[in-house]
């Protein structure tokens, strides 16, 4: 007969750490279609603080629910292996989102992130970037991750500096969002030496699509 006591012991010993400044732990998982209503609320609430550096947030002012639904489904249903979209939740509330995107190198990805209004300046952007970077190296197995930000976006630029990225240049890029100047900084972190191959190297990424991670070292 199955002795369930030993499993209950493990469950009791496992006490997730609260995210600093909150009474709940943070959770990190892939964006999914059922997030649409929650995303719609968080985008509406946060539009003003996101629109200076995120063009889609500016445009979202005219969106009805169907457009938000499309935005979520476009993010969920992409068939580009380099693109992944994750939400960060505290007490079941979406407090931020971060993504990977292609950079034109087959072994590298770029990270991007935004944090909801009322939750900025509390370390969530840094924690999300650290968690998705870990995912990129340990789960997928990328060789390097990059972060690019407009030169005037000081908050975004602080994150790679805090996480030990190397500055690897500037470039002239697009300036679609209100405060973007078109002058971009780029930062890179190479895969730490000695890491084992990514868990998904050569595997089916869908296998992990339902996984929920509790980042404990934040
Ligand atoms: C960029 C963003 C994701 C940062 O998230 P966050 O949760 O507020 O960031 P953190 O709390 O982890 O803080 C990161 C660092 O930036 C600093 N910072 C925050 N706002 C700042 C500002 N306006 N100027 C300078 N530094 C700033 C913080 O002090 C912190 O550094 P510290 O720990 O040394 O004090 C968030 O501000 C955001 O969503 N901005 C709008 C969307 C955006 O610009 N996305 C990036 C596009 S490239």
Image (cartoon, helix red, strand yellow):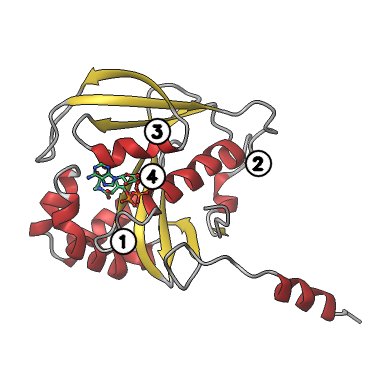
Residue 28 visible in image: yes
Q: Is mark 4 within 8 Å of ligand 1?
A: no
Q: Residue at x 36, y 57 (%)?
A: 122
Position of 19 compared to 141: left or right? Answer: left
Q: In 3D space, how far apart are the residues under numbered discs 2 and 4 (Cα atoms)?
A: 19 Å
Mark nearer the viewer, 3 or 2: 3
Q: In 3D space, how far apart are the residues under numbered discs 1 and 2 (Cα atoms)?
A: 32 Å
Position of 104 compared to 185: left or right? Answer: right
Q: What element carries label 2?
A: loop
Classed neighbour count for the residue bearing mark 3: other residues with Cα under 10 Å, few (<14), some (14–19), many (≥20): some
Q: Which of marks 4 and 3 is nearer the N terminus?
A: 4
**Mark number for residue 119?**
1
**Residue 189, x across and y down, in percent:** 48, 28
Q: In which quarter of the image is the N terminus?
A: bottom right
Q: Say if 61 sits above or below 78 in the image.
A: below
Q: Earlier in the sequence, mark 3 or mark 2?
A: 3
Q: Name the residue under label 2.
A: 199
Mark nearer the viewer, 1 or 2: 1
**Mark number for residue 161?**
3
Q: Name the residue under label 4.
A: 99
Displayed quadrant of residue 102: top left
**Residue 24, x across and y down, in percent:** 48, 71
Q: In 3D space, how far apart are the residues under numbered discs 1 and 4 (Cα atoms)?
A: 18 Å
Q: In 3D space, how far apart are the residues under numbered discs 4 and 3 (Cα atoms)?
A: 18 Å
Classed neighbour count for the residue bearing mark 4: other residues with Cα under 10 Å, few (<14), some (14–19), many (≥20): many
């Amino acid at each position: 007969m199955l002795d369930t006591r030993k499993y209950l012991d493990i469950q009791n010993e496992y006490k997730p750490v609260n995210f600093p400044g909150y009474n709940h732990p943070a959770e990190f998982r892939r964006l999914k279609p059922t997030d649409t209503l929650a995303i719609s609320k968080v985008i509406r609430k946060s539009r003003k603080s996101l629109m200076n550096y995120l063009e889609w947030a500016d445009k979202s002012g005219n969106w009805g629910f169907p457009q938000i639904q499309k935005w979520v489904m476009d993010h969920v249903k992409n068939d580009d292996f380099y693109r992944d979209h994750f939400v960060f939740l505290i007490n079941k509330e979406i407090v931020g989102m971060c993504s990977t995107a292609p950079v034109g190198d087959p072994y590298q990805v770029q990270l991007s992130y935004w944090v909801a209004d009322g939750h900025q300046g509390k370390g969530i952007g840094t924690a999300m970037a650290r968690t998705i970077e870990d995912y990129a190296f340990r789960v997928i197995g990328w060789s390097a991750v990059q972060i690019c930000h407009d030169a005037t976006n000081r908050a975004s630029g602080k994150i790679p500096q805090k996480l030990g990225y190397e500055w690897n240049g500037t470039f002239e890029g697009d300036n679609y969002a209100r405060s973007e100047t078109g002058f971009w900084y780029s930062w890179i972190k190479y895969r730490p030496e000695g890491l084992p191959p990514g868990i998904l190297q050569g595997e089916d990424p869908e296998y992990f699509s339902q996984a929920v991670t509790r980042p404990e070292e934040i």
